[in-house]
Image (tube, helix red, strand yellow):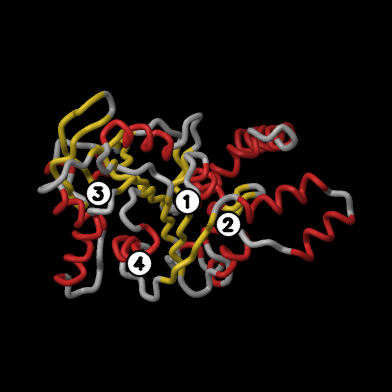
Amino acid sequence: MKQVRKCVIPAAGFWTRFLPATKALPKEMFPIIDKPVMQYLVEEAVWIWCTEIIIVTWRNKRAIEDHFDSNYELEKLLEKSNKFKKLERVKSLSRMANISYIRQPYPRWDGDAILRAKPFLGDEPFLVLFWDDLIFNRKSAAKQLHEEFLRKWSPVIATNLVEDKDVSSYWILEGNYASDKCLLVNWVKEKPKAKDTDSRHWIIWKYILTPEIFKYLEELEISNKTGEIRLADAFSEMINDKDIYWLDVDWERFDTWSYVWFIKATIKMALENDKLSPEISSYIKSLQEKWLD
């Protein structure tokens, strides 16, 4: 089994929840302070030594490509202004990894996005990171998944516990413990009622997959009349032939689907920034005093 050196980031969604902001600016490019969500994901992949990043996009997503490209005019301006720290940050973006782009012309779910990346992946295992979840932790979710993958050499799905009231909103995994925090999947359930499953382990949108997944995705593509190809459906078939594990990751998670969680992520990063923290802390305190009066 080869090492994980490639990462797929599906980024073809329209994201109507954040309209009108997403009419012109991809949601993946919304900044948390001075860094867009997409950059956090690419860095997460690079930090486990992924050297090939495949981003699945669609029209109106050119800002993603531009962000990781060089910008000669801007670089020259920063150089002439002696802003060398900013210059290095800008130039480093185009050196982070070998980034390739492929279009998903129609919204056919996550499985279709992975299939479109197949020509870039060959027979290698690969990391998958969706933009929905940002996880801030001393050890990234990708790092935790990679460590478990090197022990199991089988697909590993990131999970965490969900409260009873939220079970019906998520894909839930059932299985048996294989080791501490790691379980062997034996069932995948799509948004079950809490009373219909004892499990509270829901799928986070981060995985390490092996090339076998393509067989099951391609079979779904042939048999599915709606055109939708879902990874979870492929997992349901794959567990009949191959071990799949899930790992409860340690994390502080921010769901970028949500206004509230996006704001929380911004506040967290501001409070952890030495330059911003004093003023932001003071402002939050003043708001508390105002609303408590």
- Alpha carbon distance from label 4 to label 3: 23 Å
- Alpha carbon distance from label 1 to label 3: 18 Å
Q: Secondary structure at mark 4?
A: helix
Q: Secondary structure at mark 3?
A: strand
Can residue 16 be spotted in the picture? no
Residue at which label 1 appears: 256
x and y percentages locating residue 118 in the rendered image: 34, 62
Q: Are marks 1 and 2 in contact (CB under 8 Å)?
A: yes
| Identity of the residue drawn at 77% across and 51% down | 87
| Identity of the residue drawn at 63% across and 56% down | 94
Q: Amino acid at mark 3?
A: Trp
x and y percentages locating residue 232 in the rendered image: 23, 54
Instruction: Tell me, for residue 171, which label it has, or none.
Output: 3
Q: Secondary structure at mark 2?
A: loop
- Alpha carbon distance from label 1 to label 4: 24 Å
56 or 193: nearer the viewer: 56
Task: Please identify, in this view, whether the residue under mark 4 or under mark 2 is nearer the observer.
Answer: 4
Figure quadrant of the C terminus: top right
- Alpha carbon distance from label 1 to label 2: 10 Å
In the rendered structure, which disc, 1 or 2, sits on the residue that comes first in sequence? 2
Judge the density around disc 2: few (<14), some (14-19), many (≥20) Cα neighbours within 10 Å: some
- Alpha carbon distance from label 3 to label 2: 26 Å
**Left or right, residue 107 beside residue 272:** left
Residue at which label 4 appears: 116
In the rendered structure, which disc, 4 or 3, sits on the residue that comes first in sequence? 4
x and y percentages locating residue 8 in the rendered image: 41, 55
Residue at which label 2 appears: 30
Judge the density around disc 4: few (<14), some (14-19), many (≥20) Cα neighbours within 10 Å: some
In the rendered structure, which disc, 3 or 2, sits on the residue that comes first in sequence? 2
Task: Please identify, in this view, whether the residue under mark 4 or under mark 3 is nearer the observer.
Answer: 4
Instruction: Tell me, for residue 114, which label it has, or none.
Output: none
Q: Are marks 1 and 4 in contact (CB under 8 Å)?
A: no
